[in-house]
Each structure stands twice: as C-alpha cells, then as structure tokens.
Amino acid sequence: EWYQGGPPIPRKVIVEGMGTRAMTRVEVHLLRLTVKYDFSTASIEISRQATVGELLKSALALLPPYVTQSLNGKSLALVGPSGDAFSDTTKQLGDCHFFTEQTLKIEPEKADGTFVAKPFVPRRTFKKGHCGLSNLGNTCFMNSAIQCLS
C-alpha cells in the first residue's frame, strides 16, 4: 500500500501484417527524433504509428515562429542522414525505418518539384549527467539491479 504506483502510461497497440499473419504488439518506447531546419532543432517523442505529416506538424509547432512562417504553404519532406527524402505525408514512421535518436532535416520543395536530398552527418550531442536506463512505470528497482550487474 505504501507504493501507489504512478499515473497510467499510455501505450499504443500496433497491428503489423494482414490476415492470419497479423501480429499485435504493444509499443513500449516511442521514437525520439531530432528534426532540424537550418540552425533550429526540435526534439520529438512520437509513435511509430504516426505519419510523416504528423511528425512535420509536431516539429513545426516546436520550431521558432520565423521558421514556420518561412515554410508556410510549401510542400515539405523529411530527409534522413542517408539522403532519402520522405515527402509522402500519409506514410507511417515505422514504414520509413526511422530509429530512436535519429536526426532528420526538413527540406522544402524546389521549383522543379524535387527535394534537395543530400546525405549529411549529424553531430552527436550528449547531455551532462544523462546516463543509465529510463524508468517505465515501476521498473526503477529492476533498472538499478541491471546497472549493478553491468
């Protein structure tokens, strides 16, 4: 009784495949992505079931207003480190094969209808004091035991 737990952690159930080959799994970890445009960055936690359009909308809401105003009304794409451009706003992030801690760039459409998709090398930044395992609900005791064993 002394430990009442915490607030419920919302989870999404993801159905992959179709028919008899459909698999159901619970999404435990969200994607943590960094989205950049010029010198502005936004860090976002989002479900793999979300679409490219939802990620762009979330990123634009977190970027400074001058960025949003300069991109207003333009077709946009997300560009990964390999140079692949994702402009289909209905495509799910899980289908794009994004992974946690990945950096993506926002690119506006050029006049000829294409996107500048140059490969780039994102700089890794580390926050001081950020190490160890993340706690999900009541996992703090398990995490401390695992850290002691490693």
Image (cartoon, rainbow, N blue to C red):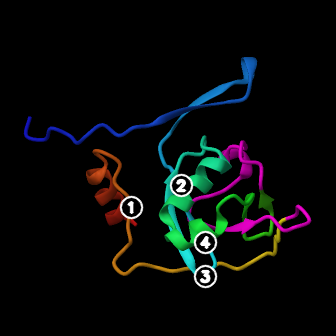
**Disc 1 from disc 4: Cα separation:** 26 Å
Q: Amino acid at mark 4?
A: Lys
**Disc 4 from disc 3: Cα separation:** 12 Å
Measuring from the top left, give residue 126's x and y in whole percent.
46, 79
**Disc 2 from disc 3: Cα separation:** 22 Å
- Residue, disc 2: 58
Nearest the viewer among 52 and 27 is 52
Tag 3 secondary structure: loop
Say if the magenta span includes residue 75: no
Instruction: Give the residues drawn in magenta, as a range.
Output: 87-114
Nearest the viewer among 139 and 8 is 8
Q: Amino acid at mark 2?
A: Ser
Q: Which residue is rendered at x = 60% and y = 40% of the image?
A: 49
Q: Amino acid at mark 3?
A: Arg
- Residue, disc 3: 123
Q: Amino acid at mark 1?
A: Leu
Q: Is residue 95 left or right of residue 10?
A: right
- Residue, disc 4: 36
**Disc 4 from disc 2: Cα separation:** 12 Å
Q: Which residue is rendered at x = 23% and y = 42% of the image?
A: 6
Which circle, 1 or 2, is nearer the viewer?
2
Tag 2 secondary structure: helix
Q: Which residue is rendered at x = 38% and y = 67% of the image?
A: 132
Q: Which residue is rendered at x = 31% and y = 48% of the image?
A: 139
Which circle, 1 or 4, is nearer the viewer?
4
